[in-house]
Amino acid sequence: MDSLGYIDNYFKGEFPPEEARQFEKRIQEDAAFAEEVAFYLSAIMAGKEQLEEERKLQFRELYQHNSQTGSNLTVVKRPLVRRMVTRLSAAAMVAAFVFGLFVVFTASSPQQLADRYIKEKLETLPVNMSPMDSIQNGSRLYNEGKFGEALQEFAEIIKANPADYTAIKHAGIASLRLQDYDRALDYFRKLESFSTLHANPAVFYQALTLMKRNQAGDAEKAKQLLHRVEDKDLDRKQDAQDLLKKM
Amino acid sequence: MPIPNSSQETDQEIILHLRQNGIDRRRSEDALFNRYAYFVREGMTKHSISEDDAFNAYSDSVLAAIDRIISGTFQGRSSLKTYLYQIFHNKCVDLLRKKATNKHSVYRTESISNMLLHITDNARSVVQKLVDQADWRQLRERLNQLNDDCRKMLLLWADNYSDKEIAGVLEYKTADVVKTSRLRCLEKLKRLYKN
């Protein structure tokens, strides 16, 4: 026990520098002592692994319990007061933003509005630091303005995994930038079928594509879709309301 | 089983409670797990993996996030949701690339390297080599063969509880008494393991 106590004191940082150096020297010169240090650390790691396994079992019970009540399927909402404060703040900011835009711009055509939105919000796709991810590669190509190559990359991902909704969304956006509106609409309709997503911008993007295409009847259809986003509280609701005010 | 009310806690409150040992930490771990449990469904849809695989990836992600929050590696530059989702996404991708086969040995090597951070290179490599040779399955079996008090004490110690905190949880009089008992338990574990 003496040597375990001695090792314990070292790892709790209780040694002055000279004694710590002696400790480290002994590890190199005394094989039995090195074994003792290794045991001490292995015991900690074995304990950590045991704890991790027990925690996972508890998480599984929690998950199974929540599955029965359906609460694993939904996003947990914050309390009403906090949500109201956030929404009111967001609404105030949007109101100020809309007023600013109103002052700067007079009424615009749906196509101009779509162009402005694309320039402001779809100029780049998010990327992170994982170089091996194909989505990231596609997004980087998109951000370099290589929309055709980006679309090819996203299409390959979808071919390998038809359920990759991020690739489907990005393929739709790349098609929109390539002015291949029919293809963009196909991708966004496919995206809409992912009903379990907690944030799905598919309906809003369909409206945006129709505004940009601007064929006969497109503006009216786009308006209907934007109203749907607003009424059903779908993703990009604020953007939809903003566009509706100007159409 | 009661469901912790995760909606009442902000990110800051969860982080604060996770960094404290005791019952608040356990509640916040459950709260964090519950709050983003819907990632499991998203993982199944996005990566076409089974519910079991998505659950394992998610619970591993929660445990990794908790570990990094406690150690201070998570610095709060992003929201907990973004941070957890990034870990979860990477774990799902690893799963698809079948790179997660030797997860535990990687985790061990990382954790032990952290503990040996201040030791000189030569001493560190000697210990690291010996730790890598340990029979982990047997060591955990022996740990579970200890009497309940010893087992609990060593698990709390492995979970970074100080002797003072262990004294509070297990109702010992002082931290010194805990230290003496803990080292005795460690000695028992060693005897069981070596024999």
Image: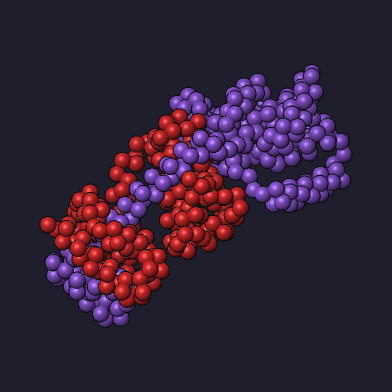
In the image: residue B56, left or right of residue A99:
left
- Could you say where residue B166 lies in the image, as x and y percent from the top left? 37, 67
Eyeballing the image, is A226 above or below B135? above
- Which quarter of the rendering shows the C terminus of chain B? bottom left
In the image: residue A218, left or right of residue A189:
right
Q: Residue at x 62, y 31 (%)?
A: A173
Q: Residue at x 23, y 64 (%)?
A: B186
Evaluate whether residue A130 shows in this view: no
Evaluate whether residue B128 shows in this view: yes
Q: Residue at x 75, y 34 (%)?
A: A230
Q: Colour of chain B?
A: red
For the colour purple, the matching chain is A
Q: Residue at x 37, y 65 (%)?
A: B170
- Could you say where residue A232 lies in the image, as x and y percent from the top left? 72, 32
Eyeballing the image, is A100 above or below B119? above
- Could you say where residue B190 lies in the image, as x and y percent from the top left? 18, 61
Given residues A239 and B81, the one toward you in this image is B81
